[in-house]
Amino acid sequence: MTDISNMRKQFERNPEIHLNEVPDNPHTLFDEWFAVARNEQIVEPNGFVLATSNGEGRLRTRTVLLKYFDETGYVFFTNYGSQKAKDIAENKMVSACFPWYTLERQIMIDGPVERVSTKESLKYFSSRPRGSQIGAWVSEQSSVVSSRAMLMNKVKQLSKSFMNKDVPLPEFWGGYRIMPKRFEFWQGQPSRLHDRIEYLLQEDGTWIKQRLAP
Ligand SMILES: Cc1cc2nc3c(=O)[nH]c(=O)nc-3n(C[C@H](O)[C@H](O)[C@H](O)COP(=O)(O)O)c2cc1C
Protein backbone atom coordinates (compact mmCIF):
# COMPACT_ATOMS: atom_id res chain seq x y z
CA MET A 1 0.00 0.00 0.00
CA THR A 2 1.21 3.50 -0.77
CA ASP A 3 0.00 5.54 2.17
CA ILE A 4 -0.42 9.20 1.24
CA SER A 5 -2.89 10.00 4.00
CA ASN A 6 -0.57 12.64 5.46
CA MET A 7 -0.48 14.66 2.22
CA ARG A 8 -2.38 17.66 3.43
CA LYS A 9 -2.28 21.30 2.42
CA GLN A 10 -3.54 24.23 4.44
CA PHE A 11 -5.63 26.54 2.30
CA GLU A 12 -4.88 30.14 3.22
CA ARG A 13 -4.42 32.04 0.01
CA ASN A 14 -7.77 33.75 -0.34
CA PRO A 15 -9.80 36.08 1.88
CA GLU A 16 -13.15 34.76 3.10
CA ILE A 17 -16.14 35.05 0.81
CA HIS A 18 -19.23 36.81 2.13
CA LEU A 19 -22.44 36.05 0.32
CA ASN A 20 -23.53 39.69 0.20
CA GLU A 21 -20.23 40.71 -1.41
CA VAL A 22 -20.30 38.36 -4.43
CA PRO A 23 -22.13 39.39 -7.61
CA ASP A 24 -25.77 38.35 -8.04
CA ASN A 25 -24.88 37.08 -11.50
CA PRO A 26 -22.61 34.00 -11.48
CA HIS A 27 -21.30 34.80 -14.98
CA THR A 28 -19.75 37.96 -13.51
CA LEU A 29 -18.03 35.94 -10.78
CA PHE A 30 -16.83 33.38 -13.35
CA ASP A 31 -15.34 36.28 -15.33
CA GLU A 32 -13.57 37.61 -12.23
CA TRP A 33 -12.16 34.24 -11.17
CA PHE A 34 -11.16 33.32 -14.72
CA ALA A 35 -9.23 36.60 -15.02
CA VAL A 36 -7.30 35.67 -11.86
CA ALA A 37 -6.54 32.17 -13.20
CA ARG A 38 -5.34 33.68 -16.45
CA ASN A 39 -3.17 36.36 -14.80
CA GLU A 40 -1.55 33.85 -12.49
CA GLN A 41 -0.44 31.93 -15.58
CA ILE A 42 -1.52 28.60 -14.19
CA VAL A 43 -1.20 25.74 -16.70
CA GLU A 44 -4.20 25.58 -19.06
CA PRO A 45 -6.54 27.84 -17.02
CA ASN A 46 -9.23 27.12 -19.62
CA GLY A 47 -8.94 23.34 -19.20
CA PHE A 48 -11.87 21.74 -17.45
CA VAL A 49 -13.04 18.26 -16.61
CA LEU A 50 -16.21 17.48 -18.50
CA ALA A 51 -18.47 14.74 -17.13
CA THR A 52 -21.07 13.11 -19.36
CA SER A 53 -23.31 10.14 -18.88
CA ASN A 54 -24.98 7.86 -21.37
CA GLY A 55 -28.62 6.85 -21.28
CA GLU A 56 -27.85 4.01 -18.86
CA GLY A 57 -26.17 6.30 -16.34
CA ARG A 58 -22.60 5.18 -17.17
CA LEU A 59 -20.43 8.20 -16.37
CA ARG A 60 -17.25 9.36 -18.05
CA THR A 61 -14.92 12.32 -17.55
CA ARG A 62 -12.18 13.92 -19.65
CA THR A 63 -10.42 17.27 -19.98
CA VAL A 64 -11.44 19.69 -22.73
CA LEU A 65 -10.63 23.35 -23.35
CA LEU A 66 -13.02 26.24 -22.95
CA LYS A 67 -12.71 28.43 -26.03
CA TYR A 68 -15.05 31.31 -25.25
CA PHE A 69 -17.88 32.19 -22.93
CA ASP A 70 -20.55 34.74 -22.19
CA GLU A 71 -23.99 34.69 -20.61
CA THR A 72 -25.32 32.48 -23.40
CA GLY A 73 -22.91 29.71 -22.47
CA TYR A 74 -19.47 28.13 -22.28
CA VAL A 75 -18.17 26.68 -25.56
CA PHE A 76 -15.76 23.81 -26.23
CA PHE A 77 -14.93 22.03 -29.47
CA THR A 78 -14.66 18.35 -30.20
CA ASN A 79 -15.44 15.50 -32.57
CA TYR A 80 -19.19 14.89 -32.99
CA GLY A 81 -18.51 11.14 -33.36
CA SER A 82 -16.54 10.89 -30.09
CA GLN A 83 -17.67 9.01 -27.01
CA LYS A 84 -18.60 12.28 -25.27
CA ALA A 85 -20.75 13.25 -28.27
CA LYS A 86 -22.50 9.87 -28.17
CA ASP A 87 -23.15 10.36 -24.46
CA ILE A 88 -24.50 13.88 -25.07
CA ALA A 89 -26.85 12.51 -27.75
CA GLU A 90 -28.34 10.26 -25.05
CA ASN A 91 -28.19 12.77 -22.17
CA LYS A 92 -27.60 16.45 -22.86
CA MET A 93 -26.91 17.24 -19.17
CA VAL A 94 -23.21 17.67 -18.44
CA SER A 95 -21.09 18.81 -15.54
CA ALA A 96 -17.88 20.81 -15.83
CA CYS A 97 -15.18 21.34 -13.20
CA PHE A 98 -12.38 23.90 -13.48
CA PRO A 99 -9.79 22.56 -11.00
CA TRP A 100 -7.57 25.53 -10.17
CA TYR A 101 -5.59 23.85 -7.36
CA THR A 102 -2.81 26.44 -7.20
CA LEU A 103 -5.45 29.13 -6.70
CA GLU A 104 -7.15 26.96 -4.05
CA ARG A 105 -10.32 27.34 -6.07
CA GLN A 106 -12.62 25.30 -8.25
CA ILE A 107 -15.71 26.22 -10.23
CA MET A 108 -18.38 23.69 -11.17
CA ILE A 109 -21.01 24.29 -13.84
CA ASP A 110 -23.98 22.00 -14.55
CA GLY A 111 -26.42 22.30 -17.40
CA PRO A 112 -27.55 21.05 -20.78
CA VAL A 113 -25.42 21.44 -23.91
CA GLU A 114 -26.39 22.23 -27.47
CA ARG A 115 -24.34 22.11 -30.64
CA VAL A 116 -23.19 25.51 -31.88
CA SER A 117 -24.09 26.46 -35.46
CA THR A 118 -21.89 25.29 -38.35
CA LYS A 119 -21.07 28.95 -38.99
CA GLU A 120 -19.80 29.32 -35.42
CA SER A 121 -17.75 26.10 -35.64
CA LEU A 122 -16.27 27.23 -38.95
CA LYS A 123 -15.25 30.57 -37.46
CA TYR A 124 -13.29 28.84 -34.69
CA PHE A 125 -11.96 26.03 -36.95
CA SER A 126 -10.56 28.61 -39.37
CA SER A 127 -8.60 30.22 -36.55
CA ARG A 128 -6.83 26.96 -35.64
CA PRO A 129 -3.30 26.10 -36.82
CA ARG A 130 -3.32 24.08 -40.05
CA GLY A 131 -1.82 21.05 -38.29
CA SER A 132 -4.73 20.95 -35.86
CA GLN A 133 -7.23 21.36 -38.70
CA ILE A 134 -5.74 18.35 -40.49
CA GLY A 135 -5.60 16.51 -37.16
CA ALA A 136 -9.36 16.95 -36.81
CA TRP A 137 -9.84 15.25 -40.19
CA VAL A 138 -7.43 12.44 -39.37
CA SER A 139 -8.82 11.36 -36.02
CA GLU A 140 -12.03 9.42 -35.66
CA GLN A 141 -11.94 10.40 -32.02
CA SER A 142 -12.55 7.61 -29.48
CA SER A 143 -12.50 4.80 -32.08
CA VAL A 144 -9.91 2.00 -31.91
CA VAL A 145 -6.88 2.59 -34.15
CA SER A 146 -4.45 -0.08 -35.33
CA SER A 147 -1.29 2.01 -34.90
CA ARG A 148 0.18 5.48 -34.66
CA ALA A 149 1.78 4.87 -38.08
CA MET A 150 -1.69 4.52 -39.59
CA LEU A 151 -2.61 7.98 -38.21
CA MET A 152 0.61 9.51 -39.55
CA ASN A 153 -0.06 8.02 -43.00
CA LYS A 154 -3.50 9.57 -42.96
CA VAL A 155 -1.92 12.93 -42.08
CA LYS A 156 0.36 12.61 -45.10
CA GLN A 157 -2.48 11.71 -47.47
CA LEU A 158 -4.76 14.49 -46.26
CA SER A 159 -1.96 17.09 -46.26
CA LYS A 160 -1.49 16.23 -49.93
CA SER A 161 -5.16 16.43 -50.84
CA PHE A 162 -5.61 19.78 -49.03
CA MET A 163 -2.38 21.23 -50.49
CA ASN A 164 -2.77 24.91 -51.50
CA LYS A 165 -6.34 24.92 -50.20
CA ASP A 166 -8.03 25.97 -47.01
CA VAL A 167 -8.74 22.90 -44.88
CA PRO A 168 -12.55 22.59 -44.85
CA LEU A 169 -14.52 22.12 -41.63
CA PRO A 170 -15.23 18.41 -41.19
CA GLU A 171 -18.98 17.83 -40.80
CA PHE A 172 -18.15 15.59 -37.81
CA TRP A 173 -16.37 18.32 -35.87
CA GLY A 174 -17.66 21.37 -34.00
CA GLY A 175 -18.60 23.06 -30.80
CA TYR A 176 -20.95 22.50 -27.90
CA ARG A 177 -22.31 25.26 -25.72
CA ILE A 178 -22.90 24.44 -22.05
CA MET A 179 -25.86 26.51 -20.83
CA PRO A 180 -25.43 26.71 -17.07
CA LYS A 181 -28.30 26.00 -14.69
CA ARG A 182 -26.06 25.72 -11.65
CA PHE A 183 -22.69 27.16 -10.68
CA GLU A 184 -20.64 26.37 -7.62
CA PHE A 185 -17.69 28.53 -6.64
CA TRP A 186 -15.42 26.78 -4.14
CA GLN A 187 -12.54 28.36 -2.34
CA GLY A 188 -10.24 26.73 0.22
CA GLN A 189 -10.05 28.17 3.73
CA PRO A 190 -8.12 27.15 6.84
CA SER A 191 -9.27 24.13 8.88
CA ARG A 192 -11.41 22.77 6.06
CA LEU A 193 -14.01 25.52 6.56
CA HIS A 194 -14.05 26.25 2.88
CA ASP A 195 -16.31 28.72 1.10
CA ARG A 196 -18.89 27.24 -1.26
CA ILE A 197 -21.27 29.57 -3.07
CA GLU A 198 -23.99 27.96 -5.15
CA TYR A 199 -26.05 29.76 -7.79
CA LEU A 200 -29.23 28.21 -9.15
CA LEU A 201 -31.05 29.46 -12.24
CA GLN A 202 -34.74 30.20 -11.64
CA GLU A 203 -37.62 29.79 -14.11
CA ASP A 204 -37.75 33.57 -14.60
CA GLY A 205 -34.09 33.70 -15.63
CA THR A 206 -32.82 35.18 -12.35
CA TRP A 207 -30.29 33.47 -10.10
CA ILE A 208 -30.48 32.67 -6.42
CA LYS A 209 -27.23 32.41 -4.50
CA GLN A 210 -26.63 30.54 -1.26
CA ARG A 211 -23.80 29.23 0.86
CA LEU A 212 -23.22 25.48 1.12
CA ALA A 213 -21.55 23.73 4.01
CA PRO A 214 -18.00 22.67 3.19
C1 LIG B 1 -5.27 19.63 -21.49
C2 LIG B 1 -6.18 18.85 -22.41
C3 LIG B 1 -7.01 19.53 -23.27
C4 LIG B 1 -7.88 18.83 -24.11
N1 LIG B 1 -8.74 19.55 -24.89
C5 LIG B 1 -9.62 18.88 -25.66
C6 LIG B 1 -10.62 19.61 -26.39
O1 LIG B 1 -10.73 20.85 -26.31
N2 LIG B 1 -11.47 18.89 -27.17
C7 LIG B 1 -11.41 17.52 -27.25
O2 LIG B 1 -12.20 16.94 -27.97
N3 LIG B 1 -10.51 16.82 -26.54
C8 LIG B 1 -9.61 17.46 -25.75
N4 LIG B 1 -8.70 16.75 -25.01
C9 LIG B 1 -8.71 15.27 -25.12
C10 LIG B 1 -9.85 14.70 -24.25
O3 LIG B 1 -9.47 14.71 -22.88
C11 LIG B 1 -10.30 13.29 -24.66
O4 LIG B 1 -9.19 12.42 -24.70
C12 LIG B 1 -10.96 13.27 -26.03
O5 LIG B 1 -11.82 14.39 -26.21
C13 LIG B 1 -11.77 11.98 -26.24
O6 LIG B 1 -12.74 11.90 -25.21
P1 LIG B 1 -14.02 10.93 -25.33
O7 LIG B 1 -13.52 9.63 -25.86
O8 LIG B 1 -14.53 10.82 -23.92
O9 LIG B 1 -15.00 11.60 -26.24
C14 LIG B 1 -7.86 17.42 -24.13
C15 LIG B 1 -7.01 16.73 -23.24
C16 LIG B 1 -6.20 17.44 -22.38
C17 LIG B 1 -5.33 16.69 -21.41
Image (cartoon, rainbow, N blue to C red):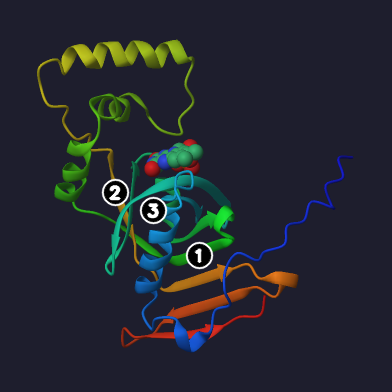
Q: Is residue 54 visible?
A: no
Pointer 1 with pointer 2, Cβ within 8 A: no
User: Residue 151: x and y, percent?
Assistant: 39, 17
Mark 1 and mark 2 lie on one chain; the one further toward the N terminus is: 1
Q: Quadrant of residue 202?
A: bottom left
Pointer 1 with pointer 3, Cβ within 8 A: no
Q: Residue at x 39, y 53 (%)?
A: 89
Say which quadrant the N terminus sits in.
top right
Q: CA distance from mark 1 to mark 3?
A: 22 Å
Tell me: 165 left or right of 193: left
- Circle number at residue 175: 2
Tell me: 6 left or right of 208: right
Residue position for label 3: 89
Say which quadrant the C terminus sits in.
bottom right
Tell me: 211 left or right of 192: left
**Residue extending farthest left:** 164
Q: CA distance from mark 3 to mark 2?
A: 14 Å
The correct choice, above or below, for 144 with respect to 183 in the image is above
Amino acid at circle 2: Gly
- Circle number at residue 173: none
The correct choice, above or below, for 149 with respect to 133 in the image is above
Residue position for label 1: 108
